[in-house]
Amino acid sequence: MATRVVIFIPPDVTALDVMGPLQVFQMAGIHTGEDYRFEFCGLTRSVPVAGNLHFGNLKPFHTVKVRGTDILIVGGFQGATEPELRLMRRHPAFFEWLRRAWQAGATVCSTCTGSFFFAEAGILDGLSCTTHWADCADLQKRYPLVDVRHGILFTQAGNVFTSAGVAAGIDMSIHIVSQRHGPKMAFEVARRLVIYLRRGGDEEQESIYLKYRNHLDDTVHRAQSVIVEKL
């Protein structure tokens, strides 16, 4: 059985936003025997990535027809929201492309600020969603019809999945693997990827293990680490 995973690479994408989910589905394919096939697309054939990298050899997004059996992943971007939205609004066909994928019944997923593109397309109207904790208030202000869940890792509303920043895209993808292949396989994928803790969608974005760890004195950090190990 083959499943196509279409990954849209926006300009200034945060690489882990798309590479994390990619690795999850690659690993799922290895252990389930399902043929996950990946297609990468963007506005142009080469897209700059945060950190002075480039994704190349991309298909123009409008040439990729997303079917109901596909998984579509839209990455987020680094930097200010308004310039990125202004850039994408020059390509109204992109938002229509997202809507068609959603209406076709594809599993449509955003990581980090990719949720802004879904909201702009009207996909999130009346639905629960999330994004990076630093951008939740902005998302809610810009799109009042959207129910933004602040501070959680990922959401599911029908065939629409949204996740918080960067690493949360891995949590979201493992959740999808669990739905498709069962919790045992999701555990195996997480184990193979050396995921320290498999996290649910409603868990807080700020890890309890990072709270109160902003001291300048490393001695305090070591003492906290000892306490955590004893819990």
Image: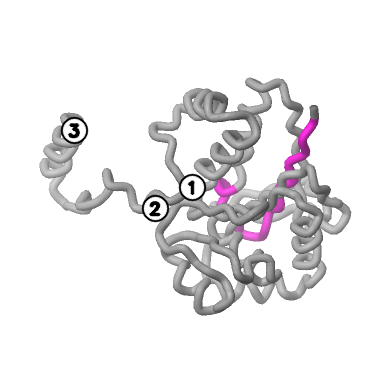
Q: Earlier in the sequence, mark 1 or mark 3?
A: 1
Which amino acid lies under the numbered mark 3 shown in the image of this protein?
Leu
Q: Is residue 212 left or right of residue 183?
A: left
Closest to the camera, between mark 1 and mark 3, is: 3
Whole-percent x, y for residue 190 in the image: 50, 29
**SS state under label 1:** helix
Tell me the CA gap for discs 2 and 1.
Answer: 8 Å
Residue identifier under label 3: 231
Magenta-span inclusion, residue 197: no
Q: Residue furthest right?
A: 63
Q: What residue is rendered at 45% in x and 72% in y?
A: 137
Residue identifier under label 1: 168
Tell me the quarter of the image containing the N terminus: top right
Q: Earlier in the sequence, mark 2 or mark 1?
A: 1
Q: Earlier in the sequence, mark 3 or mark 2?
A: 2
Label 3 neighbour load within 10 Å: few <14, some 14-19, many 20+: few
For the record, the magenta segment spans 2-17
Where is 39 relative to 153, above or below?
above
Dot 1 and dot 3 residues touching (CB under 8 Å): no
Q: Nearer the viewer, residue 57 or 197?
A: 197
Q: Quadrant of residue 12?
A: bottom right
Please indicate, yes or no, whether residue 49 appears anywhere in the rendered image: no
Which amino acid lies under the numbered mark 1 shown in the image of this protein?
Ala
Label 1 neighbour load within 10 Å: few <14, some 14-19, many 20+: many
Tell me the CA gap for discs 1 and 3.
Answer: 24 Å
Tell me the CA gap for discs 3 and 2.
Answer: 21 Å
Residue identifier under label 2: 205
